[in-house]
Amino acid sequence: MNELELLGPRAGGPALGSAVLKAVAEDFQVDEVLDIPLSGQGEHLWLWVEKRDLNTEEAARRLARAAGVPLKAISYAGLKDRQALTRQWFSLHLPGKADPDFAAAENESLRILERTRHSRKLQRGAHSANGFTLRLTQLQADHAALDARLEQLRVQGVPNYFGTQRFGHLGGNVEEAQHWAERKALPEQRNLRSRVLSSARSYLFNRVLAERVEDGSWQRAQVGDLLAFTDSRSFFPAGESECSDPRLDILDLHPTGPLWGEGIPATQGAAGALEQRIAETHAQLCTWLGNAGLKQERRILRLPIGRLTWHYPEPDILQLEFVLPAGCFATVVVRELLDLVPAGQTDSPCVF
């Protein structure tokens, strides 16, 4: 499966040129944004960790070994790419224990930048956002055209596709999910089960979003839509008055798409008809997700780009800085600008 099949069409028009991303780890930097005041006391040790070319799960294993605790005692808010320079929080449950010596865990690929205590562990999905600094090299594109497109993205956002990282090499995770759905079974191994379920949900969401990008309704509320605010997991139905809510214009309120689970989405009208058609086309996957015990959830169709700035350190380098809500992919922002020339393969989802 190629990128177009896994995601969908671009919203802003064809790519304006090409560039390389992730030639080195420093070209893709991620800083987790966590709005939790830490007390400095408690049985949970929180670590602010910088990782280079190291994925989150391997970092957790390394910290657990150094601390002499089981892996289940380590918590983190989200998964980050291996091929990147990332900074994120981990917590370790250490009731009645002193802070461990992490010297065995630290080297050029992992550094502990800060440590403090707190009364609670770090929950999955607790981060509010991720800050990105991307350095695109070997740039072949007109600067004026890029500037105009970036101003457009600042105003209207981008389609909130799940990035190709979610689906594995050439969509292998989706194909694996389809095999399990055909067997009406789930993998016993927890990480594999989580990966195939999330890949299937993400793929179906992208199918709905792709059609709404195609017809231009991805950034427009329709009667029958389910609407949600940028930072909220709750949603509500759109009537005629909701479709003219001024918060839609300032990218605070958005139409949503389905994250499939048990039952059917509560959308109506044109949005409901589209989601029903996608469900019928992929009936086996939808039934399998419902039987897996997942609930119907929603995800915003439109991704607002916070604090977007850019400059050109060299004529053939574009540096972007921006903030995205947790669970959203920086690569779908870049995709609206440029075709990326591969400099290495990303092996894990950017964030959950």
Image: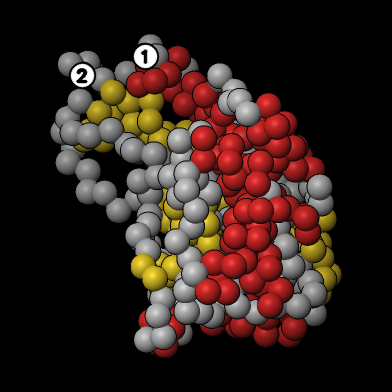
Which residue position holds label 2? Answer: 95
Instruction: Say which amino acid is labelled 2.
Output: Pro
Residue 135 appearing in the image: no
Q: Identify which residue, 130 or 246, lies in the foreground.
A: 246
Q: Residue at x 34, y 38 (%)?
A: 123
Q: Is 137 on the left-hand or right-hand side of 84? A: right
Packing grade of label 1 (10 A; few <14, some 14-19, many >=20) is some
Q: Residue at x 75, y 83 (%)?
A: 145
Estimate the x, y position of residue 326 in percent, counting from the top left: 45, 54
Q: Is 103 on the left-hand or right-hand side of 302? A: left
Q: Residue at x 36, y 68 (%)?
A: 236
Secondary structure of the residue carrying numbered label 2: loop
Q: Is 167 on the left-hand or right-hand side of 117? A: right
Q: Residue at x 28, y 33 (%)?
A: 121
Q: Identify which residue, 180 or 94, lies in the foreground.
A: 180
Secondary structure of the residue carrying numbered label 1: loop
Estimate the x, y position of residue 27 in percent, counting from the top left: 65, 53
Instruction: Say which amino acid is labelled 1.
Output: Val
Quarter assignment of residue 44:
top left
Residue 148 appearing in the image: yes
Distance CA(mark 1)–CA(mark 2): 11 Å
Disc number placed over residue 69 in the picture, else none? 1
Q: Which badge, 1 or 2, comes first in the chain's sequence?
A: 1
Estimate the x, y position of residue 224 in percent, counting from the top left: 47, 74
